[in-house]
Image (cartoon, grey):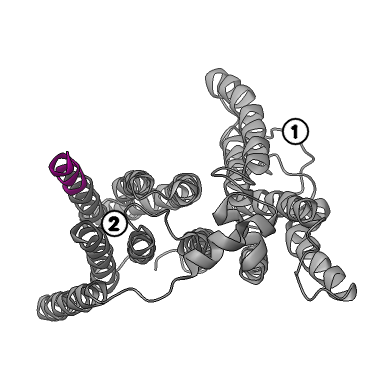
Amino acid sequence: MSRRASLAVSLLLGLLTLLLLWVFAQALAQQPGPRLAELAATELPRSAVSNPVTAVLLNYRAYDTLLELAVLLAALLGIWSLGAASPGYQPAGPALEVMADWVVPLLILTGGYLLWVGAHAPGGAFQAGALLGAAGVILRLAGHQRAGLPSESSQRLLAVSGTAVFAAVGLATLAFGAGFLTYPPDWAKWLILLIETAATLAIGTTLAAAYVGGQPPENPEGVRSR
Amino acid sequence: MTHLLFVFDLVLLATLLGLAVAALTSPDPRRAVMLFIAFGLWLALVWARLKAPDVALAEAAIGAGLGGALMLAAARRAARRGTDRLKGRKSGADQA
Amino acid sequence: MTAQFLFGGAGLVLFALGIWSFLVHEPLLRKLIALNIMGSGVFHLLIATAERGDLPPDPVPHALVLTGIVVAVSATALALALGRRLEEEDPDG
C-alpha cells in the first residue's frame, strides 16, 4: 500500500473511531431499558445450575452453543480437507519429556474439575475443552505426531460427539413433547452435564487436531518417529 | 479509594492498548505473536476486573494459549521461509 | 458511568487499531493478528457493557463472548491451514 493510501486509511479510521466513541457516549447517557439480566437472574433457580453463564450457554440459549459446536466441527473439516499434517516435531529432550509427563495428567485432571465445577462457579465445557486441547499441544510439541489423539476414525467420532449428543438431546426432548432443547426440570442437571461432557471431549479433540493442522498422520499412537 | 481504583483502571487500559499497538506494529512475526499472547493474557486480567471470570478463563486458555500456540507455529514457518529466501537471494548474487 | 465509558471506549479503539493494521499490513500472519485484535475489541466492548457497577454483571453478553472466543480461534486455525496450503502450492509467493 502506498504511503498516501495508508495515510488516508488512518485518517478515515480516526474519524470512524471518534464517531463510534460519540455514539457509545450517547448510548450510555440514555436510561437503560429492560435488560435480559433480570430475567436470567429470576429464572436461575429453574435452570438446574447456579452459574448464570452456564445457565445462559446450556439452557436459555442452548441453540447458540449447538451451532457454535457445529462451527467448530466445520472448521476442523476444513482443516482436514486441506491435506495431510506436517510430520511433527522431533522427540523431546529429557527435560521437556518429564515436564509433559507431569503436566498432561494435571491438565486432564484440571479439565475434569472445571467441567464439574462449571455448574456453580466459573468454568464449564469451553474452558475444560481448552485445557484438553492444551494437553494435546504439549504432547505434539514433545514429539507425539498425533498430539496424543487416537486413530483417525476415533478422532472423527470424538469430534462429532459434541454436536451429535447435543442434537440428540434436543430431538429427545422434542419427541417427549417439551420442545427442542427444553429440558424437563428433574432431568435438566444430568442432561446439561451429559451435553457438557460430550462438548468438552469434542472441543478438546478439535482444538488439538487443529493444532496438528491437517489429516492425522498414520503412525500408531506412542511411536515417536525420527 | 475510588480515585485509587480509577488510576488502577487507567493503568490497566493503557497497558492493554500499548500491548495491542506493539503487537500490531511489530514487523518480526515471532515477536508480534509473543506480544499478541501477552495482549490476550492482559485482556483476561482486565475481564477479571470487569467481573467476568468465566470469560477471562476462556480467553486466557483459548484466545491467548491455543491461538498463540497456533500462530507461533506459523510464525516459525514464516521466519524460516524468510531466511531461506534471503539465503537464496544471497547465493543467487554470488553466482551472478 | 465514566469507568464504563473508559472500558468500552478502549474496546472501540482496539477495534479501530485492528482494522487499521488489517488494511495497512501485507503478510497473512499480521492480518490474522489484526483480525484477532479487532475481535477482542468487540468482546471487550460487550464485557464492558455487561458490567453494571454494584449489580451482578449481565450473564448474556458473557455467554455470547465465550462462544465468540471459541469461534474466533477455530477460524484462525482454519485460516492458518489455508495459508500453509498456499505456501506449499506457491513457495515463492
- Image height of A160 relative to A13, above or below: above
Q: CA distance from mark 2 to mark 1?
A: 41 Å
Chief secondary structure of the magenta portion:
helix
> Is A186 situated left or right of C93 in this image?
right
Q: Residues within 10 Å of mark 1 (few under 14, many from 20)?
A: some
Q: Residue A157 in the image: x percent, y percent?
A: 81, 57
Pointer 1 chain: A
Name the residue located 33 percent from the left edge and 66 percent from the top edge. C38
Looking at the picture, which amino acid does disc 2 mark? Arg
Is B49 a magenta residue?
A: no
Q: Residue C8 in the image: x percent, y percent?
A: 27, 63
Pointer 2 chain: B
> Is A201 situated left or right of B96 in this image?
right
In this rendered view, identify the residue nearer to me: C65 or B32. C65
Q: Quadrant of residue C49?
A: bottom left
Label 2 residue SS: helix
Residue where numbered disc 2 is placed: B89
Instruction: Kindly give the residue lying farthest to the front in the view shown.
Output: A42
Q: Considering the image in quadrants, where does the C terminus of chain A appear?
A: top right
Return the mark for residue A222: 1
Q: Is residue A85 visible?
A: no
Label 1 residue SS: loop
Span colored in magenta: B1-10
